[in-house]
Image (tube, grey):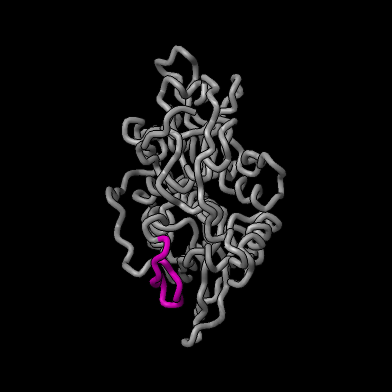
Amino acid sequence: MGNQTSSPVVATDDPDLARRHHLGSASSSSLASPLSDPLLPLPGSTTAAAGDVLSRRLDAVVPPQSVQPVCMLAHGDPLILAVQTFNRHNISSLPIAMGDGHGFEFLDVTDLMAFVSEQYGDDGNFSSRNPTLSVPRSATVGATLRQLVTHRAHRLLITDDANDDKGTSLYQVVTQTQLLRYLSTSLPPALASATLAEAQFFGTNADQPLRSVDHATPAFAAMAQCLAWAVHRVAVTYPASETGSPKLGVFGAWDVPAAVVAPHPPTARPVVPKSGRTQSPNPNKEKTVVPAWTPGPACVPGATVAAVCRPAATVDLDDPVSRVVGLLATRVREVFLVDGAGCPLHIITQGDCLRLILEHMQE
């Protein structure tokens, strides 16, 4: 695979990085939110017309290659290298060059969770639940957003065939987080100021039961339960505190890499230069060296989900939509809608917010 070198940090699609283990309060009814400080306005807030926002090209959303090059692996690379790359860059998916002209497919953290739970044998399923879709670099924000919403995808490949004699190549990956961060500065005023109750916004499948596991559930059993329920995350419940308010955690597929492999000084492969993005990143087929690794906290005998989950961010019906969007655009992947006693009712995700914003911007 060649020499391992340090590469630039790619665009993270987990905004929870800096606050991963921080306890605080996001609403008066929560004792377990990772957010204790007020939510600050996002930089660059604007009142641009929805049509202008949606008609801009993707270059307005994703960073240029010179700032954050795309990172990918080859189909023949060891799985442990993918896990370390997830941990190193705090990302939840990687484009995998399939080789021999077969293009790219995403390997994501749900595939990893399925693999370690022995649901799909030795090879994972290469994100069949989250299909590998692409858009050209010239695509507008609106077209990209509609494709994400229609297919309920979490990210899309961005291809670029401009000035490339070798044909279409991989330029970047655009994620839900990047789109939500971009759109959060241009919310329609009526939507931004509306409370969740006024907007009747309760998240995906509000009529479906909230999936949860007890904090004492074995870590790998919690992963298997996510797969059995076909969900990306579950609430982690604890006994009521001395104040009578419940403590709440969350465990999802994106917690799996750090749970099974301890993060340590990175040994991820280099970012692939433009000249190599039309073929396998390992064109000379040199022998790949499996990097050293250390088992993570989930691998400790008797480990429970409490050892690998995160504090949950919570909101209530009186919180404005702008707060929920701001949290999901900059800090967390999901927020829990709780009642007055702090008990979780529903989950609101980044995808939920994107669907809501698109609906209002198209009105």
At x 69% / y 41%, what residue is drawn?
A: 122
Number of numbered labels in the structure image: 0
| Relative image position of residue 89 (x, y in whole percent) | 42, 45
| Relative image position of residue 288 (x, y in whole percent) | 54, 31
At x 50% / y 79%, what residue is drawn?
A: 340
Of helix, strand and loop, which mostly describes the magenta segment?
A: loop
Q: Does the magenta stretch include residue 25?
A: yes
At x 49% / y 35%, what residue is drawn?
A: 143
The image quarter in which residue 204 lies? bottom right
At x 46% / y 22%, what residue is drawn?
A: 276
| Relative image position of residue 303 (x, y in whole percent) | 59, 66
Q: Is residue 194 magenta?
A: no
> Does residue 269 lie above or below 299 as drawn?
above
| Relative image position of residue 192 (x, y in whole percent) | 39, 58
Q: In this view, does 200 lie to the left or right of 60?
A: right
Residue 146 in view, yes or no: no
Of all residues, the one furthest to the left in this rendering is 44
Comparing 107 with 262, the one in front is: 262
Comparing 66 with 86, the one in front is: 86
Comparing 337 with 219, the one in front is: 219
Residue 33 in view, yes or no: yes
Q: What are the residue bounds of the magenta stretch?
A: 20-34
Q: Is residue 212 left or right of residue 1?
A: right
Q: Is residue 302 left or right of residue 118?
A: left
> Does residue 85 lie above or below 339 as drawn?
above
